[in-house]
Amino acid sequence: MNPQQTFEIIALELNRNANPEKSVGMKKYMKDQGEFLGISSPMRKEITKEWMKVRWETESENFDFFHLLWNAPYREFQYLGMEWAHKQKLWKSENFLSILEYCIHSRPWWDTLDFIAANWAGGYFSSFPEKREEVLPRWISHPHFWFNRVAILHQLTYKGKTDEGWLERCMLPHFEQKEFFIRKSIGWALRQYARTSPDWVLDFVEKHPLSNLSKREALKHL
């Protein structure tokens, strides 16, 4: 089957299991940032578990399949697209940057962007560290604050491999931002790195004018 045919079968199964009553609560929880079929995460994963294994021979076919999922009208399709693309490690292609940036710009909300930051952006820059100098400055200064958040959070899973220079560089321009999601991301990035290097984080917090939210998050476990 080609990507379009596979997508149509998956869409049929998901729509067949829609729960309009649950969709109302799910949409409300996400502040109306998208439409929902009303399928819980465990049920969605059970319905689609066999399709998580599908993969085509060409990169263009795999990218096409992802775009079909991402551009479908319900949030459950975006979740499936994210999980499928990550399982297939599509981020190991240098060309994946186009998908990465497309997803940050389209349908952005924390439920997708945080996964994308830690898993896709983190995986991509781990695979192609030379791309950081080309891409990250643009994200750091981007007027769309979700790009800023992804830049700040992309090293969440790096632990001892964290590049402290880039961690600092991604955060420095945003200390005065009033946006909740940016202040929270600064604190989260520091809190996570504090598990590996608490002294560096304590020193960083002491030297820089962080918001109360960022500071509280950064020092949460110290």
Image (cartoon, rainbow, N blue to C red):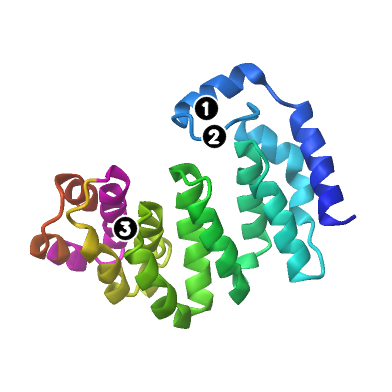
Label 3 crowd bin: few (<14), some (14–19), many (20+), radius 10 Å: many
Q: Mark 1 points at which residue?
A: 27
47 to the left or right of 1: left
Q: Name the residue located 34 percent from the left edge and 61 percent from the top edge.
A: 152
Image quadrant in which you'd find residue 44: top right
Considering depth in this image, is 159 or 123 the residue closer to the camera? 123
Gap between marks 2 and 3 measured at Cα: 27 Å
74 to the left or right of 169: right
Could you tell me which secondary element the residue under label 2 belongs to?
loop
- Specify the amino acid type for callout 1: Lys
Residue 118, magenta (yes or no)? no
Magenta-highlighted stretch: main secondary structure? helix
Could you tell me which secondary element the residue under label 3 belongs to?
helix
Q: Are discs 1 and 2 less than 8 Å apart at CB?
A: yes
Q: Mark 3 points at which residue?
A: 189
Q: Are discs 2 and 3 less than 8 Å apart at CB?
A: no
Q: What span is in magenta?
A: 179-203
Report the disc number at residue 101: none
Q: Name the residue located 79 percent from the left edge and 70 percent from the top edge.
A: 58
In this view, 180 is above or below 177: above
Residue 193, magenta (yes or no)? yes
For the image, the number of numbered tags is 3
28 to the left or right of 141: right
- Specify the amino acid type for callout 3: Ala
Could you tell me which secondary element the residue under label 1 belongs to?
helix
Q: Mark 2 points at which residue?
A: 34
- Residue depth check, mark 2 versus mark 3: number of the one nearer the observer: 2
